[in-house]
Amino acid sequence: MSAALPEPNPHIAAMAAYTPGEQPQGSGWVKLNTNENPYPPSPLALAAIRAVVAAEGAALRLYPSPDASPLREAAAQLHAFPATDILAGNGSDDLLNILIRAYAGPGRPIGMLDPSYSLYPVLAAAQGAAVVKVPIHADFSFDVAAVAKCGAAIFFLTNPNAPLGVSFAPVKVAELARAFPGLLVVDEAYAAFADADCAELPKTHANVVVTRTFSKGHALAGLRAGYALCPPGLATILHRVRDSYNLDRLAQVAAAAALADTGWLRETVGKVRSERVRLTSGLEALGWTVVPSSGNFLLATPASAQRSASPATGEHAYAFFRERKILVRRFPNHPLTASALRITVGTAAEMDAFLAAAQAWSEG
Ligand SMILES: *Cc1c(COP(=O)(O)O)cnc(C)c1O
């Protein structure tokens, strides 16, 4: 007779795990629910992985660079940024977690715009930190002064925003950085698809850190890699709380190779952006409302002659697509998103399939 499972820490007992988007089993799905890139990753990334597993994988016997030096060097090159001020992460979620471990805790809340990425509150709960939410208004703006006085030790600005898709101009982010006394994290998971980004800000603003991922723009969500561009002094702090080998050997070299393949990125992002335009105009022609997007997804509110926009209409459309093996995502818990669907921009064929189903729904 063994003892019962002991109670975890009280703040862990009180929290719930993050709910990731569905990864459906079986084939035949048009998967437009988790903002993955529909194209294969850079061949240079695959070649880098093959090189590591060559010679019967002899290199895998050895620990990798503890601080992911191949990836940090590649990012330093790309951004003309000191490699010592770049921190690599096992996906950008790892970076967000590291930042929260170092800057948030009991009495040191995190801040975020509402709506934005629902992982931040989960990571905060794991550190016993409270969450302060600053609203995004119906016109998709937010109040800089409200963030400045929100009392958070660390504030997450998802830019472009997910799930809305809207972006905030770098001048606005710089204004926010000057007004906000804590650490401002600009989560640039979707920067590859936007017209502008904030990668330069950490060079001139001592409280701004920018996080990037390979999961969206670089089509490497299965690899788990990201990096943070840190202001001077921050990386040294963050190294204390990360896993000692937080990126595996394959991720380090594949991400470095992907970053250097700027031609691949330009071509792929160009295709996604042109499908984004086509999807937007196709849905608007059906009478749907589409939020202007700087990401690889659209937040669109279904409506038709038969059905006005509402959460129930959104749910109805979601179920209609799901029956046709088209998977999108719903965000029912916020007024700006409750009636809408978030649709990942896929290939031309996937967008044709989605638009055909949307037309059938709108006419049904
Ligand atoms: C997808 C996403 C991430 C996470 O990226 P990973 O590198 O896969 O961990 C971070 N932030 C936002 C806003 C995202 O949408």
Image (cartoon, rainbow, N blue to C red):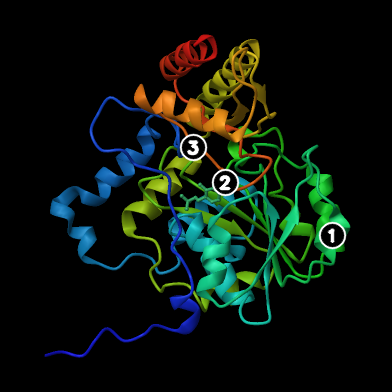
Q: Is residue 56 left or right of residue 358?
A: left
260 vs 323: above or below = below
Q: Which mark is residue 329?
A: 3
Q: CA distance from mark 2 to mark 3?
A: 18 Å
Question: Which residue: 40% across, 52% down?
Answer: 224
User: Nearer the viewer's eye, disc 1 or disc 3?
Assistant: 3
Mark closest to the chain's N terminus, 2 or 1: 1
Q: CA distance from mark 2 to mark 1?
A: 24 Å
Q: Is residue 14 left or right of residue 145?
A: left
| Residue with the mark numbered 2 | 189
Instruction: Give amino acid for label 3.
Output: Arg
Classify the position of the N terminus by image quarter. bottom left
In percent of width and height, residue 318 lies at: 47, 30
Quarter where residue 104 is shown = bottom right
Instruction: Give amino acid for label 1.
Output: Ala
Quarter where residue 168 is shown = top right
In the structure shown, which secondary structural element does the residue marked by tag 3 occupy? Answer: loop
| Residue with the mark numbered 1 | 146
In percent of width and height, residue 273 lies at: 59, 24
In percent of width and height, residue 111 lies at: 70, 64
- Nearer to the camera, 332 or 101: 332
